[in-house]
Amino acid sequence: MKKYFTFIGPIAAGKGTQAEIISKKYGLLHLSTGQIFRDAISSGSELGLKVKNIIDSGFLVPDTLTNEIVKDMLGKIDLSKGFILDGYPRTINQVYALNDILSEIGIELDDAVMIEIPEEDIIRRISGRFACAKCGQNYHDEFNKTKTEGVCDNCGSHDFVRRNDDKPEIIKTRLQHYYSEVEPIVEFYKKENKFLEINATGLSIEEVTKKLEEALF
Ligand code: AMP
C-alpha cells in the first residue's frame, strides 16, 4: 500500500483536516510544518521566537530553517508507519530539499496531492476556523462544529484558539505567497508522475475524504 504523501494546496483547502482524518484512519503519521511552528511559538522555544513574527505577518519561514526542521523530524519518526506531510514542500527549493532528504533515508514519495478550492471560498472558510487549545483538534464555526458547543470532541477541553495568521489582511499575504510558489511545484510532481489533484469545491469534509481515499488507495 502507498504510504508516503504530501498534501499541497492553498490555505483553507482542507489539507490539515483531511491529513488528520486520513492519517488516523490508515495509521499514518500526520506531519504539519505549520503545527510544528505553532507548537514552538506556544512553548516559547528558540525556534518559536525565530518564527513568530514571520508567521504572524503571513510570510513563509526561510527554506533553510524549514528544511532543517523537516530533516530532523523525518530522522526521528518511525518511517515504517508512513506519513502525510501537510504544508511542506511549499517552495521549489523545499521540493528539491525533500527529494534529497528522502533519498538519504531511502524512501520515495508516493503522491503529491493537491486539494483545490477557488480563491473566493478561501476567506469564508478561514474566517470560521478555530482549534482546541489543548489537543489541537481543528474545528469550523459553520462546517465542522464541536458536537457539544464549547467542548472539544477529542479531549473535552473548554479552551479554544484562533490563529493570528487567519486575519483577513494576513490571509491576502499568505495567498500571494502560495500562488507565486505553487506552479513549479506542480510541474515538478507532474513530471515525476506523482501529482494528484482533488477538486474540493462545494464538497463536505466527508465527500472530500471519500474522493481522496478513492484517489490514493
Ligand atoms: P500552515 O499551518 O500550513 O498554514 O502554516 C502556517 C504558517 O507556518 C505559514 O503561513 C508559514 O508562515 C509557516 N510555514 C508552514 N509550513 C511552511 C513551509 N513549508 N515553508 C515555510 N513556511 C511554512
Image (tube, rainbow, N blue to C red):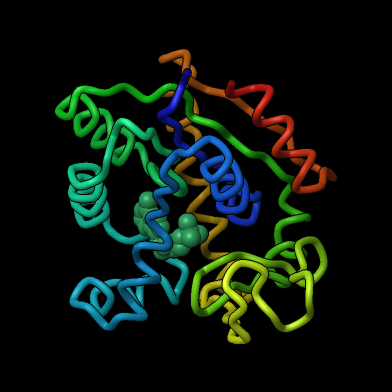
Is residue 170 in view?
yes
Q: Residue at horizontal 78%, vertical 80%?
A: 149
How many discs mark residues in the rendered view?
0
Figure quadrant, ligand 1:
bottom left
**Location of residue 148 in the rendering, given as x and y in whole percent from the top left corner:** 78, 76
**Location of residue 150 in the rendering, given as x and y in whole percent from the top left corner:** 72, 83
Q: Does 78 appear above or below 64?
A: above
Q: Residue at horizontal 68%, vertical 67%?
A: 139
Is residue 90 in view?
no
Q: Is residue 5 left or right of residue 124?
A: left
Q: Residue lying at the far front in this picture: please name it.
A: 156
Viewer-side residue, 133 vs 8: 133
Q: Does 152 appear above or below 64?
A: below
Q: Residue lying at the far left in this picture: please name it.
A: 104
Q: In this view, does 50 lie to the left or right of 17?
A: left
Q: Residue at horizontal 43%, vertical 27%?
A: 3
Q: Residue at horizontal 46%, vertical 21%?
A: 2
Q: Is residue 73 left or right of residue 127?
A: left
Q: In which quarter of the image is the C terminus?
A: top right
To which quarter of the image does residue 162 belong? bottom right
Viewer-side residue, 38 vs 139: 139
**Location of residue 121 in the rendering, given as x and y in whole percent from the top left corner:** 77, 55
To which quarter of the image does residue 130 belong? bottom right
**Location of residue 115 in the rendering, given as x and y in whole percent from the top left corner:** 63, 39
